[in-house]
Image (tube, rainbow, N blue to C red):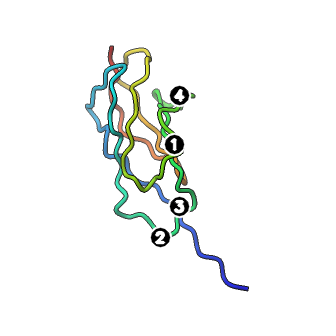
Amino acid sequence: MAEMDKRAVFTPPVTYPHAGTVWFKGQTHNVTWDTSDAPVNITNKLGRILLRKGDTITPLILQENFDILLGRIEVTVPWVLPDTDYSLVLFGDSGNFSPEFSIQE
């Protein structure tokens, strides 16, 4: 029996939005992440981006079912309460948070 290929967990760092970024409701933005250290065999290549408010991951899915190796995906800013403690959670193999940023009206 052939030995199975080893799979690796890939947790790419989110590069945009960054701390100090201000988004406005209804705009579109390219969320970006660094894929330069991607392993050859990734456990899960399907990505999903969720909105996080403070320490709570919201049920708002901003984008899903994209190839995590793309390094960027366009999202539309949701209609949420204006605040400064939002971040994004990039899921593929595991979750990785962006820095906190603002969403305004």
Circle 3/circle 2 CB separation < 8 Å: no
Q: Which comes before the other along the chain, label 2 or label 4?
A: 2
Q: Which residue is mark 1?
A: 48
Q: Look at label 3 and name its amino acid.
A: Val
Q: Which residue is mark 3?
A: 9
Mark 3 vs mark 4, foreground winner is 4
State the quadrant of the C terminus: top left
How far across and down, in percent of the image, does residue 91 sit? 51, 46
Q: CA distance from mark 2 to mark 4?
A: 30 Å
102 is higher (above) or lower (below) than 39: above
Residue found 48% across the figure and 39% down from its top: 49
Q: Which comes before the other along the chain, label 2 or label 1?
A: 2
Circle 3 residues within 10 Å: few <14, some 14–19, many ≥20? some
Circle 4 residues within 10 Å: few <14, some 14–19, many ≥20? few
Q: CA distance from mark 2 to mark 1?
A: 20 Å
Q: Secondary structure at mark 2?
A: loop
Residue found 46% across the figure and 55% down from its top: 11
47 is higher (above) or lower (below) than 22: below
In front: 80, or 75? 75
Residue found 52% across the figure and 51% down from its top: 92
Residue found 47% across the figure and 44% down from its top: 90
Q: Secondary structure at mark 4?
A: strand
Residue at the extreme bottom of the image, as rendered = 1
Left or right position of 62 against 35: right
Q: Look at label 4 and name its amino acid.
A: Leu
Q: Look at label 1 and name its amino acid.
A: Arg
Q: Which residue is mark 4?
A: 60
Q: Which residue is mark 2?
A: 40
